[in-house]
Image: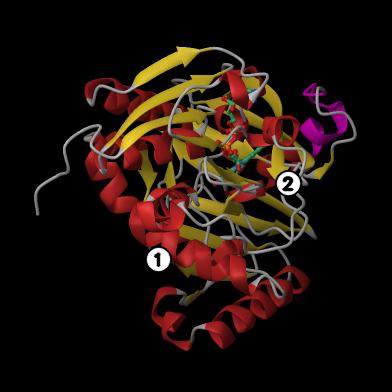
Amino acid sequence: MCAPDRGSRGDLSVVGGGAVGLTCALAAVDSGWRVRVYDAGPTTRAAHVAGGMLGCFAEGHPGEDRLLAISRDSVARWPALIERLGDPTIATAADSLLIGATAADMEHLRAQVRFLLSEEPDDADRLPAVTPADLRAAEPALVRGIAGGFRAIGEGSVDNRKLIAGLQRALDAAGAARIDAHVDDLADVPGDQVLVAAGLGTRTLLPGVELRGEKGEILRLRRTRFSVPPPAHVIRARWHGRPAYLVPREDGIVLGATQYEAYDAADRAPLAGGVSDLLADAGEMMPSLRTYELAEVSAGIRPSSPDGVPIVERVDERVVVAAGHGRNGIALSPWTAHIVTELLSPDTASSTHQRSRSLTWN
Ligand SMILES: Cc1cc2nc3c(=O)[nH]c(=O)nc-3n(C[C@H](O)[C@H](O)[C@H](O)COP(=O)(O)OP(=O)(O)OC[C@H]3O[C@@H](n4cnc5c(N)ncnc54)[C@H](O)[C@@H]3O)c2cc1C
């Protein structure tokens, strides 16, 4: 099939250059839009601090069946996106190990897997149970005595910062314009169509979009010459009742993350308590990490919708919104780009009622 002529569909402005905005912008360029991306920079960008896990099974919790279906769809689209970006090193792991420290942690994991398989029994092959010996064979640096776990096959990770750089490069190469600017009013933005994908900033531009901020501390550890190599899998632990994860990078790991309600959207200061909990859990889980350097301590705010399902909808004849991706915005970017491309197509663009929930636009 031939690619459509660039610009043949019209002019699209994208407000927001995070994971969601850039992935949607690239899909729009590839489907024939002439695209401009406006972005206020990385300081408030959740995608800058994120772990980069392409979570699906590990993010599937009872009551979140809609989110699980979206995640399954999106994770399946990731190989094509990596190929489009032409840099396989953006992907940092292909599979995850879901591990439980104690019998009680394992019971929690088993309940989660029961839910997942009740939604999709065919997934059993992609979620095999693993013994403590299997875990140590897969990741020899894991501490002895872990109760057990599951392997989540095909649930990998990306380097979030390489991803953003790769998307920017691909957009530049495809002739899209990227403008470093904070947009205060959508009326100031040119274009036949406007996509608002500004993370938490979306609620200022579109007050009808209800978003909560969920803050989280996250750390970056760098391997030294005295350290064992980083794990080859994403390791997602239920560790004495607390969630914790290790996400491989070329030079170390990302260790995350805490999660709690952010009462001040400008507050991205990491709290000492969160940082010390993460270090304590990681040091127990994989004692050799104690020889890694603590390269970066940060905190970010996840832009979350009230029910956890992203808000990807047409607002009016000119504006589409893609926001509220919460803890999974990187993983869900390819699915979002697919839906946004459909919403921008001439048939749906003329309808003002493509809404999956009741929002008041004003
Ligand atoms: C600690 C932590 C760990 C996470 N780990 C993961 C993970 O492992 N996997 C995963 O899938 N997700 C993870 N997330 C969630 C993920 O980061 C977000 O869901 C995702 O980044 C949302 O993407 P976005 O593009 O909507 O928003 P953002 O990434 O926040 O980007 C929004 C962009 O819009 C710009 N902007 C805002 N307002 C304006 C304006 N008025 N004008 C112009 N530009 C504007 C900002 O500058 C920013 O660049 C994590 C988040 C946190 C905080």
Tell me, yes or no, if residue 152 can be seen here: yes
Q: Residue at x 41, y 74 (%)?
A: 126
**Can residue 108 be found in the magenta stretch?**
no
- Residue 162 image point, x, y percent: 39, 28
Q: Residue at x 36, y 61 (%)?
A: 76
User: Left or right of 90: which side holds 275?
Assistant: right
User: Which stretch appears magenta?
Assistant: 267-277
Kind of residue sitting beneath label 1: Ile
User: Left or right of 243: which side holds 315?
Assistant: left
Q: Say if 156 sits above or below 272 in the image.
A: below
Q: Residue at x 48, y 30 (%)?
A: 14
**For mark 1, does the 10 Å Cα neighbourhood hold few (<14), some (14 to 19), or many (20 or more) residues?**
some
Considering depth in this image, is 52 or 103 the residue closer to the camera? 52
Judged from the image, the secondary structure of the residue bearing numbered disc 2 is: loop
Considering depth in this image, is 185 or 303 the residue closer to the camera? 185
Q: Please identify the residue farthest to the right as the structure is shown.
A: 263
Disc 2 versus disc 1: nearer the observer: 2
Q: Which mark is residue 19?
A: none
Q: Based on the displayed image, in which of its 4 quarters is residue 58 positioned?
A: bottom right
Judged from the image, the secondary structure of the residue bearing numbered disc 1 is: loop
Q: In this figure, what is the number of numbered marks?
A: 2
> Do the residues under discs 2 and 1 have CB atoms within 8 angstroms?
no
Q: Which residue is mark 1?
A: 153
**For mark 2, does the 10 Å Cα neighbourhood hold few (<14), some (14 to 19), or many (20 or more) residues?**
few
Q: Quadrant of ligand 1?
A: top right
Q: Which residue is mark 2?
A: 361
